[in-house]
Amino acid sequence: MVQNRQRILIFKTLFVLAVCVLTAVILEVTARFIGFGDPIIYYNAAWGGIRPLPGQQVERLKGITVTIDGNGFRTATPKVQGALRILYLGDSVTWGGSSVDDTMLFTEVAADVLRARGLKVYAMNAGVNGSSLMNQADIYLHSQDSVDVLVWLFPWGDVHRAYATAGYLWPPTKKPRFALVEAIDHIIRVYWLTSFRTGGQGAPEEYIHPEVPYGYEEFFDRVLPDRFRRNLDALDEALSKALSKGIPVIVGITPEQTEAHLVPNPTKAIELLRNLEARGVHIMDLHSVIGAAADIESVYIDNIHFNSRGHRLIGEALGKELTAILRGVLETV
């Protein structure tokens, strides 16, 4: 009788273990199928702060490809001798994320417009998730002797961001052993951590107003103006260097959307663009570009980031702008 009970207990234990192992295997396979398990790895650079490690190519969500070349830029087309070097600065909007393929990014779409005219182009996508204008300006100041054209598109929220560096929690600095580890990390970071960071109201944007830690409104009233000044000073320094070198510069503010409507640029953003235009910077009216879509929501992944259709709209418009700016160069091709 005792032996029978022991056998039943052993059988039940083995059955539970088998179910747990099978469940883990199914979840691991599912996570890999979704695209987890092989993230882009980042490091803290001496210039630009947080940067993706050079020399990576991974397959991510829905089979899209993310490529980081040997120079640390996201691009589908390797650098070739004599190519026009276009540096694209920005944050996650320029980076494109893990659901837009390299070839569909506005950086590559715009370059393809020029390539169709016979021009060799090296599209240097230096966009980094969560970066500030200070980070982005650093990248240009380091690369300025290897740039022929500068394109700087960013959402207005970047003017309030702190200088970004890689930390322990985010972004990945090592490859996970299992895809399930990255999937769980994603769920915790996106769905659980924000529940106490924002009181359940949604993901924070660098603790920018109005979503700041409760009781710290006065503190951030003092901090944010300083961030604003430092970011705009960094923008001004980088653009001044580019203009002094005779490098064509394109600047645009990527629009946010809410309930299928584009959010107008703040007054300070409009003033900045006007001042830059007066200095010889080419301004992209991205509100008009995105506003041309019949269904605004159809070009966004969320309220800030664009899907492949949105990237194509921006890329084609940017390609036309670059064609006009580089008319003299194209005539000699």
Image (spheres, rainbow, N blue to C red):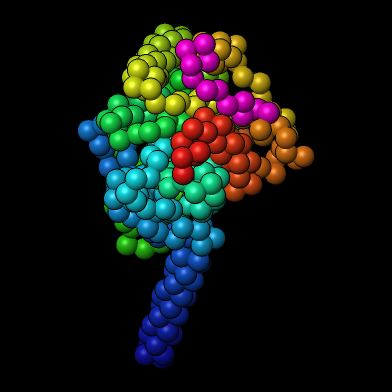
Residue extending furthest right?
294
Left or right: 142, with 21 as reference point: left
Q: Position of residue 80 (x, y in %)?
A: 34, 51
Residue extending furthest front?
332
Q: Position of residue 17 (x, y in %)?
A: 41, 75
Q: Position of residue 206 (x, y in %)?
A: 45, 27
Q: Residue at x 56, y 12 (%)?
A: 274
- Please tell me whether residue 54 is drawn above or below residue 227 in the rendered image: below
Taking depth in this image into account, of 299 and 109 the one nearest to the observer is 109
Taking depth in this image into account, of 44 and 181 the one nearest to the observer is 44
Q: Residue at x 34, y 22 (%)?
A: 245
Taking depth in this image into account, of 272 and 178 the one nearest to the observer is 272
Q: Position of residue 148 (x, y in %)?
A: 38, 33
Left or right: 286, with 211 as reference point: right
Residue extending furthest left?
46
Q: Quadrant of the N terminus?
A: bottom left
Left or right: 260, with 77 as reference point: right
Residue 39 makes an appearance in the image = no
Q: Tell me if residue 247 is in the magenta stretch.
A: no
Q: Tell me if residue 280 is in the magenta stretch.
A: yes
Taking depth in this image into account, of 20 and 230 the one nearest to the observer is 230
- Please tell me whether residue 59 is drawn above or below residue 254 in the rendered image: below
Q: Residue at x 58, y 26 (%)?
A: 284
Give the total of numbered labels.
0
Left or right: 214, with 314 as reference point: left
- Please tell me whether residue 176 is drawn above or below residue 260 in the rendered image: below
Residue 176 makes an appearance in the image = yes
Q: Which residues are magenta?
A: 277-288
Q: Quadrant of residue 319?
A: top right
Q: Residue at x 36, y 63 (%)?
A: 178
